[in-house]
Image (cartoon, rainbow, N blue to C red):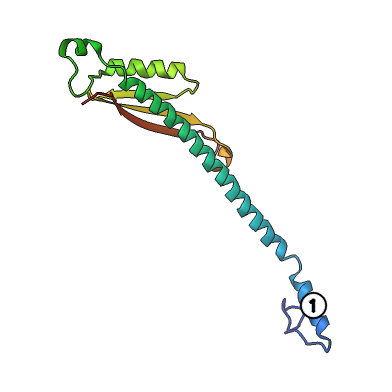
Amino acid sequence: MDDRRRPYAARVPTIDPTVDQAVDQARERGSTLPFVLVCWTVAALMAFGAIAASDAFLEQQEVQAVCDGAALAAANRTDESIVYTSGVGTELPLTRAAAQAAVADQLADGRTTLDSWSAETDGAEVTVRCTRFVEIAFGWLFLGGEPLERTATASARAPTLP
C-alpha cells in the first residue's frame, strides 16, 4: 500500500529528538482551542444557571412574604357577628367572606401584584394560596422565554389567650 493513501503513515524516527517533538507539537496544534471553548461554554452556562436560580429563589421569597402577610391579615379579621352572638371560645371564628375581604384589602395596600390568589378557612384557620408569573434572568435560555410560575401557600390562626 502506498504511503500517500494511508492517512497515518508509520513515523520514521529521526536522529534528532527535537525534530520528533516539533512534529508531535505540530500534529497536536489547534486541539486545545475546542477544549477551551467547551470549558468556557460550560462555565458560562453554570454561571447563567446560578443567576437564574437565585432570581427564581428571590421571586419565590417575595411571593411567600406577600402570601404570609395576607394570611395574617385574614386571620386577624374575625367574624364579629359570631363573636357577639356566641362569644370567644378557644379560637376566634373566621368566615370565608371575611378572609377573602381581608386578603383583598392586604393585597390592595401592598406593592406586589399577584396573578391569582385564593383564601379558604375551616372556621379557625385560614389558608391563602398566592400565584405570580415572573420573568427571571436568562429565562430565554432556560425556560424558552416562558414566565416562571411562583406559588406560595400560607396558613394562620387567629391569636387567642388560653
Estimate the x, y position of residue 6 in percent, counting from the top left.
72, 79
Q: Which image quarter: residue 39?
A: bottom right
Looking at the image, which residue sits at the far bottom? Answer: 15
Mark 1: which secondary structure?
helix
Estimate the x, y position of residue 100 in percent, counting from the top left.
33, 18
Estimate the x, y position of residue 44 in percent, counting from the top left.
63, 50
Instruction: Say above or below: 116 vs 2.
Output: above
Q: Residue at x 19, y 24 (%)?
A: 90
| Quarter that holds the C terminus | top left
Residue marked by disc 1 = 23
Estimate the x, y position of residue 121 in percent, counting from the top left.
26, 24
Looking at the image, which residue sits at the far left? Answer: 86
Q: Viewer-proximal residue, 97 or 13? A: 97
Q: Is residue 136 left or right of residue 157?
A: right
Q: Residue at x 55, y 46 (%)?
A: 50
Q: Residue at x 44, y 16 (%)?
A: 108
Q: Is residue 30 left or right of residue 96?
A: right
Q: Is residue 70 left or right of residue 53?
A: left
